[in-house]
Image (tube, rainbow, N blue to C red):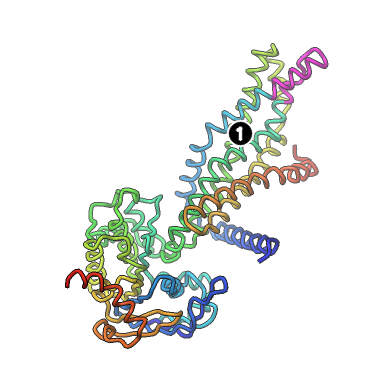
Amino acid sequence: MIKIRNVYKRFGGKNVLNGLNLDIYDSEIITIIGSSGQGKTVLFKLIVGLLKSDSGSIIVDGTDITRLDEKELLEIQSNFGMLFQSAALFDSLNVYDNVAFGLRHIGGMSEQEVRARVREVLKLVSLDGTENLSVSALSGGMKKRVGLARAIATSPKYLLYDEPTTGLDPVLAESINDLILKINREVQVTSIVVTHDMNSAFKISSRVAFLHNGVIEETAAPDEIVKTENAELRKFIASSTENLLGYLR
Amino acid sequence: MTGFKKFLYGLGDAAVLFGKTISVIFRGKIEYDIVLKQIIKIGNESVALVVLCGFFTGMVLALQTGETFVSIFNEPLYVGLVVSYSMVLELGPVLTAIVVTGRAASAMAAEIGTMKVTEQIDALYTLGTEPVSFIFVPRFIAFVVALPVLTIFSDVAGILGGLLVSIAKLQIPFSKYWDEVRILDVSDMVHGLIKSGFFAFIIVWVACYNGMKTSGGAEGVGKSTTRAVVVAMVLILVLDYFITSFLISMGIG
């Protein structure tokens, strides 16, 4: 379980997070939604320890990661798998070496075991047979899938997705949503998704958290959150869906 | 933040980066396959340029020296001596460092900068790896090994370039040129190679640091690459004097 308590983060004189509180429960898929520039990615990076908060605590399974030194933090970080917005695959390595990277550095596995695990996770993301492709030969959707395979290869406890469907066509975005659900079901992880894609949020989430003005203003299951009284959240949901509904009408 | 304060912060960050790099090397956490790849990459990218520049520098040195002595003493004296000493002690290490900075260090700063803006550096942390051990240490070792080797290539090319001009244009016999080259001793070679190792250290440190400090997308990558090249070249030329003074005072070369 992750407990975020009273977290503040400031960039260049601007408060991005203003005493944010959030609980993330084991095995759930929680989606953090909010407009661009509200600090979703900042929160995301704070949870993994890629950024340091100005104050407050982030407690991962009982350990406050804001108080750890670099070496201790690196150990905690190995509990996290992360799908970056740009997939962040290593250009200098092929698909196989990208997926094997974490296994070689964290695992203590033999190369044979690494090979078997790479095949297994590539199959899970429907990319078996692509081991020898270079990163530059992959499409946007394939990159996200390889990024996902790399993130789950080390069997992390927490899986974080930063805008997993951004920049993908609707069909591909839907397939990524299905993949997130499939992985959550089959790999038994806690998934934290940051997105402004409401379609994705409604489809995959156990709970949705609305980030606005540097705090989580509302947290609820998708069927509850649509009934919200929060004007900003209503506006956010409505503007995400009204064009489509207009056409459908 | 004022410019001076920024400079001090930058110096502090660069010092921390250096400390971490040394600590990883002493802990023995070295990715040897990446070191080898980097050595081959630096060599492939730079060897032809280094040899070409060294060869023509040797040629022009021989020409200038020969013509100057001819105009004063009516004879091309000490051409082999001037070319070989200039190349081995000074021009070989400095020119090689400048060429490698323009070719390999700029590519390295751009590569690390791109990794930074495309979140590949963040990805390393989540895959249980410190960027220092995956990125800096292999490049650091590769440069410290590759640059002295390239410097030897440059020295040899320069001496051969001088030989060509001496024989073809100044009518100096091969044996006379070669006898003067042979006056060079091991300590002269060591002098040049120590400088070369020190330049390698400056290049890789400046390129890695600027790459890591990249922000702001493609424009940021361009800026940090340019900054890395300019700072490394200036530092090489300025610190060359102080290293040379130090080595001479120690009786090396």
Residue shown at 34%/85% (left/top)? A219
Residue B16 % position (x, y)? 61, 62
Q: Nearer the viewer, residue B8 or A80?
A: B8
Residue ranking furthest to the right: B72
Residue A138 sits above or below residue A35 on the image: above
* Residue A128 on image: x %, y %: 23, 55
> Label 1 crowding class (10 Å Cα cut-off): few <14, some 14-19, many 20+?
many
Task: Please tell me whether residue B73 is drawn above or below residue A30 in the rendered image.
Answer: above
**Start and end of the magenta stretch?**
B61-82
Label 1 amino acid?
Ile
Q: Residue at x 58, y 61 (%)?
A: B20
Q: How far across and down, in percent of the image, does residue B218 sit?
A: 47, 53
The answer, for residue A157, to whether it is visible in the render is: no
> Is residue B81 inside the magenta stretch?
yes
Front position in the image: B41 or A87? A87
Q: Please tell me whether mark 1 sits on a helix, a strand or a loop.
A: helix
User: Does the rendering let one see residue A216?
Assistant: yes
Circle 1 chain? B
Q: In which quarter of the image is the C terminus of chain A?
A: bottom left
Image spot of residue A190 (x, y percent): 32, 76
Q: Residue at x 80, y 43 (%)?
A: B249
- Is residue B181 highlighted in magenta? no
* Residue annotated with mark 1: B152
Dominant secondary structure, magenta:
helix
Residue farthest to the bottom, as pictured: A229
In this rendering, position of residue B40 left or right of residue B203: left
